[in-house]
Structures are given as structure tokens and as C-alpha cells.
Image (cartoon, grey):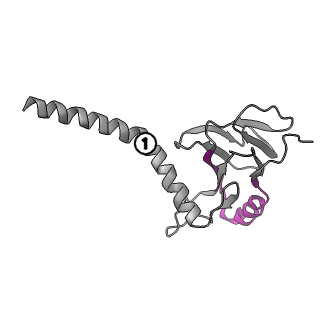
Amino acid sequence: MKKYIVAFAISAIVSHLVFVAFLPKLILVLYFFTTTSAGYEENKIYHAPPINASQRTVVLPSPNLLYSFCIYDISEKPLLIEVKVPENTYWSVSFYDSSTNNFFTINDRDVRDEARILLVKGNADVKNAIVVRAKDEHGFILFRTFIPDKNIIPELEALRKQWKCEPAETYLFD
């Protein structure tokens, strides 16, 4: 009987460790599958509409935030993210690797006016850009903007339409 208990305990521990190790990867694989099968392309920014009770494109969304996202693939080229930062409201960009680990976040306290971010998989020194080194070639970027007043949603939406998340042709910027 003790043999069976020990075997069960060992298999339970191993199963738990495998589950914990691979669950984040599985979550992102499912996320990529559902977003790409829904027509979302890599290295392109998408803007979710304002959150309401019937619409949830983001996990545990806040109705006081506007969400945008970009699924990235930097296996061939680095990714250039250009964002005009909204005035007088909270704004952030968070980068997640293929295991759903947040590896970089920047917000309106760090950047004023315009953020120019280059996501690379290796080393790069670039003038006029914030260089972010990704651990993986695949992941996603989540943009959040606080809505202080519902009346400025059209203004924030117009600003979001100017944002870019696209492969960088060169590391050289003016």
C-alpha cells in the first residue's frame, strides 16, 4: 500500500510541476490561436472598443480603460512602436513574452508627448528610441489608457488611430 501512496505522491508532484511550467505557454498558444483565427495579424496594432457589460476582448477589463494590443513576432525584424501619449491621463504600454511574463512597462510618468520604442531580440543602440530587449521572438504588447471623462473618448480614439506597431526597416532614426 505504501508503494502506491509514494507512487501517487510522486506522480502528483511531477504532474503539478509540469502543469505549472507549461500553463503560461499554453495560455499564450491558445491566445495566439484565437486571435489569429479571428483575423488578427502579427506586428499590427488593434484597438478594442470601450468596454461595456457585453463586450470583453481583454481578460478582467476595466470600463475606465481603453485597451489596444499588438501580437508581435520579431524573428525577422525588430518592431517599432510609436505612440503619441495622451495628455492629462494615465497611459501605459506593457510587454509580455511567450510565457505571459511582463518584461517591460512604460507609462505617462516615464514618457511625455511621444513614445518611440524599438523591440529587439538582440542588442541594439538607437538614438531617439527606447530600446526594449525581448527574451522571446513572440509575445504581445498591451496598451492601456485611462478614460477620465466619457466625453473625451472620441479624442482618445483619434489619438489611438495614430499609434503604430510595425516591423522596423532600419535601426536608424532621425
Residue, disc 1: 22
Q: Nearer the viewer, residue 56 or 101?
A: 101
Q: Determine which quarter of the picture holds residue 102.
A: top right
Residue 20 counted in the magenta span: no
Q: Which quarter of the image is occupied by the C terminus?
A: top right
Instruction: Look at the picture and state if 31 lies above or below 20.
Output: below
Q: Which residues are magenta?
A: 138-165
**Amino acid type, mark 1:** Phe
Residue 35 placement (x, y as % from top left): 57, 61
Residue 157 in the image: above or below residue 142: below
Label 1: state its secondary structure. Answer: helix
Question: Could you say where residue 43 lies in the image, as x and y percent from the top left?
Answer: 70, 54
| Image coords of residue 93 (percent x, y) | 67, 46
Foreground: 147 or 107?
A: 107
Task: Indicate yes or no whether the magenta region holds residue 145.
Answer: yes
Describe residue 155's horizontal placement relative to residue 138 as left or right.
Answer: right
**Vertical arrangement, residue 28 with respect to residue 14, above or below:** below
Identify the residue shown where x is 54% and y is 67%. Answer: 52
Identify which residue is drawn at 67% across, 46% down: 92
Q: In the rendered view of the protein, which quadrant contains the N terminus? A: top left
Which residue is farthest bottom? 54
In this orientation, which residue lies closer to the viewer: 49 or 35? 35
Neighbourhood count class around disc 1 (C-alpha, 10 Å): few under 14, some 14–19, many 20 upward: few
Camera-side residue of 100 and 58: 100
Residue sitting at x 49%, y 67% = 53
Residue 73 visible somewhere in the drawing: yes
Residue 59 in view: no
Give x and y (percent) for residue 18.
37, 38
Q: At x 9% / y 29%, what residue is drawn? A: 2
